[in-house]
Amino acid sequence: MTTDAHDTRSPGMTPLAWAALLVVYVVWGSTYLGIGIVIESMPPLLHGGIRFLAAAALLAAFLAVRHGPGVLRVPPRRLGSAALVGLLLLTGGNGMVAVAEQYVSTGLAALLIAAVPLWLVVLRTAGGDRPPAATLLGVAVGFAGVALLSVLPGGSSGSAFGAVVLLLAALSWSVGSFLAGRLPMPASTFTASVYEMAAGGAALLALGLARGETLDLGAVTARSWLALAYLVVFGSLLAFTSYAWLLGNAPLSIVGTYAYVNPVVAVLLGALFLGEIVTWPILLGGAIIVLGVAVVVWGDNRRPRPPRTNPTILTDPSIARLQARP
């Protein structure tokens, strides 16, 4: 369903929104580990194409059975908007994360993606919004934690190429998130997710083939297959949908804070399952990141609710329009 066109207030944080944000916090934090395991025996771009096309097909089938095939019909302009958002979020954002994880640790990948809230604040400001000082302070604090984790002795380290790719991924993801709330999208958040994942997945397949990637099914391990299944069901169908729904139902600055929590989850899981070293700089940086999250949430909850820039942005509390981060 769509929001009331007369509702001039931006969305606040309801219990449902907090639950969806918790899913994004935890599940997406684990997807860095999932990607790391999948690309042990699968090409990075082709695996992403398979993941998102499979998720799109499953979600489309569910919608067609539950609501009828008509739920998948959308006007060309809205279809184009969904495809563009999917390319930015999944091909540019998620795809570059998978490529980068060939060169850097899963923990460092999550840490550099934490630049997303900073980009979101810059984009909001350029669009005429004026985030409160507390929000800006929270972003600065969180990014300082990321910097500590990256530069202090004993922190994470990786190749310069991988780091640059991750920063570009963060920028692409931020632009996609920003545009998703301002472009004319399909009336159902779930339907939008189908086309976003289909466009992003198809582009990843095309790029993978153009890059010369090949998939040797006989060489794919059971461990990678299980990780891919997890990414499809939990990373895409659950967390990505929750994120997309949050974009239309919660303040953007609060939604963006997942990028501060995900690194903490990713670093812990990387240490537990991949043997990545956890040092005191990592623990210190993680604590600062969590503090940044708290400051951003507090600051945005205190701000007055401005008029919505797009009162027709779709919101469907029963079905979320996922947008997958890594």
Image: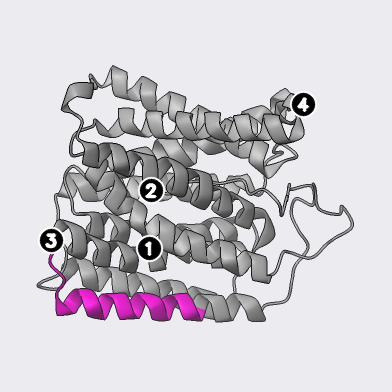
Q: Residue at x 56, y 46 (%)?
A: 322
- Magenta region, main secondary structure: helix
The tag earlier along the polypeptide, 4 or 1, is 4
- The residue carrying mark 4 is 70
- The residue carrying mark 2 is 326
- The residue carrying mark 3 is 275
Inspect the magenta stretch and tell me whether residue 8 lies in it.
no
Q: Residues within 10 Å of mark 1 (few under 14, many from 20)?
A: many
Q: Which residues are magenta?
A: 277-295
> Is label 1 in contact with label 2 (beta carbons under 8 Å)?
yes
Camera-near label (3 vs 2) is: 3
Which disc number belongs to residue 262?
A: 1
Horizontal relation, residue 33 to residue 75: left or right: left
Image x and y of residue 136, in percent: 50, 74
Between the residue at mark 3 and the residue at mark 1, the CA separation in whole angstroms equals: 18 Å
Residue 256 to residue 68: above or below: below
Amino acid at circle 2: Pro
The tag earlier along the polypeptide, 2 or 4, is 4
Q: Residue at x 69, y 31 (%)?
A: 65
Residue 62 to residue 110: above or below: above
Element type where label 4 sits in the image: helix
Q: In the rendered image, which quarter is residue 247 located in? A: bottom right
Element type where label 2 sits in the image: loop
Between the residue at mark 4 and the residue at mark 3, the CA separation in whole angstroms equals: 49 Å
- Judge whether residue 216 can be spotted in this image: no
